[in-house]
Amino acid sequence: MLLQPSTMDFIFSTAFLVILLGLSVAVGFMSKKKSETFNSWLVGSRNFGPIVTGLALTATWLSGWACLGLMGIVYTFGWSGMWLAGVWTLVGIIPTVAIFGPKLRNRFEQMKATTVPQLVGAIYNSRGIAALACAIYIVLLLVYCVGQYKAAATAWHVVTGTSWELSILVSAIVMAVYMAVGGYTGTQWALAIQGIFIFFACTLLGILALAMVGGVEGLNLALAQQDPKLIEPLRPDLAAKPNLQFAADLIGLTATLGLFVTMAAGFPHNVARFIGLRKITKRDLTIMTIVVFITASVPWFNLLTGLSARARFHAELFNIATAKQDAAGPMVALALGAPISGFYVAAVFAAAISTLAGMVMVMSGSLTRDVIQLLKPNLSDKALLNTARVLTILFSLIPIIWVILRPPDLLAYLMAGAAVGLGCIFFYTLAVSLFWKGAHKLGAAACMIYGFVMTALGGYYVYTVAQWGWGNWWWATFIGCGIAYFAFSKIGTWKSKG
């Protein structure tokens, strides 16, 4: 039987959200003095330690998808949905912290880069490549931003029973304010705070959800009684629907592993967390890795929450018109009652606005630095700073229009599509370039164009007409990006020597 929100659910949700937003705005204004020039707004003083950096990275990595969308996946498909729903989360993020992170931090410093696209352009000694990277980032990140607002809107509406528009608009405005005022420094501190919210709320929710259905034994028994297929690790019966290949066969399973590895290293809002990192020792690196390992384990607890929702509510959530399976996490929170429900709502907002903040900073800073300044090199520092601040507000609000007019049906699908493109493209053009000296701008351009085209085609052939298998699409995008990157880099090198 579905549950109805109570007054206490609303009160605690409002209270925890006010605390979260209040702390975020406070650190934004406290960081104002460190963000009074365009460069300092973009990168701060570059003296953040491993704990704050680790928490901030966790916050941008654990998006609204991780704290709400993945629960809808396992609620729908059972254990077989775990491959797309976050079981690989640490396999993806830990190499980024331990291997790519220090190298990225050093590259930002060596090349005096203040944005991720600028770093990409500096690696290939091409402003055109920087501009192309900026354009691709903006298009795909806007798609990903929609998913963040959808996650927060769903959690708020289901748990409080009230309209979500005001809460989303207020949160977006608050986020825009602390970013515009505090720049990178304020945003990094706010992300760290949000990372703490996410970890404690979602971990507690997962533990209590599992206890609610009788532990692991009770969970699996309840799932098996509904449908034995819900406890299978892979479901060949889903192969008939190509867009569900991630849960159906080994191609889909391995593709989800590749997805998490590539997007962890390719997401610009993840990479940007290392811009402000101080020069670290081996001890610092160990601390940062441990912080991320602990806090970024949240999706494993969220898997338990989503599966517990299926055990507790059976297939009833599919009948919720506005949320359907994405209501899995919020409905479990309602079942556990206040204050847990309010704490969870704040965690979803923390996950959503933290990822949004990282993305908006990338988009506004990059568009100003890598496109507008390129076209108008004589703009003053103050003009550049004001432009970036205005763009921050615009990029914070634009995705809300999409959410209001046509919200995506299942959150994880939309965000996985954008993640395929961002991961495959920038895994090569950014992460691989740290280790391969033969990288050339022609290879980078070919990789970006191929990856972007394949992302667009996948949106149609995988999700619209369901003719391409999801795993086949990811592998075709990943392998094709690699071939384009290496082959055209060789061609560019030969032409340069000739």
Image (spheres, rainbow, N blue to C red):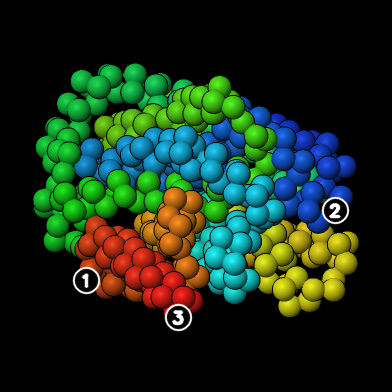
Tell me what residue is drawn at x 46 percent, y 75 percent.
497
N-terminal of the pair, mark 1 or mark 3, is 1
Q: Residue 378's quadrant in the figure?
A: bottom right
Work out how far the residue at label 1 is from the one at label 2, CA to CA, in angstroms: 50 Å
Image side of residue 289 versus residue 396, left or right: left
Residue that lies at the very extreme toward the front in this rendered image: 498
Q: Mark 3: which amino acid?
A: Gly
User: SS of the residue at dot 3?
Assistant: loop
Dot 3 corresponds to which residue?
498
Q: Which residue is mark 1?
A: 467
Circle on res. 37: 2
Please say whether residue 96 is visible from this viewpoint.
yes
Residue that appears at 47% across and 68% down: 440
Q: Quadrant of residue 479?
A: bottom left
Image marks 1 and 2: residues in contact by CB distance under 8 Å: no
Asked if marks 1 and 3 touch (Cβ < 8 Å), the reply is: no
Q: Position of residue 256 (x, y in %)?
A: 29, 49
Q: Nearer the viewer, residue 24 or 328?
A: 24
Split into 4 quadrants, where in the image is the N terminus?
top left
- What's under tag 2, amino acid-wise? Thr
Q: Amino acid at mark 1?
A: Gln
The structure residue drawn at horizontal position 39% and vertical position 55%, both measured from the top left corner, is 416
Give whichever of discs 2 and 3 has the lower sequence position.
Answer: 2
- Residue 166 visible in this rendered orientation of the protein: no
Residue 306 pos. (x, y %): 34, 36
The 10 Å Cα crowd at callout 1, few under 14, some 14 to 19, many 20 or more, is: some
Counting residues from the N terminus, which is met first, the one under dot 1 or under dot 2?
A: 2
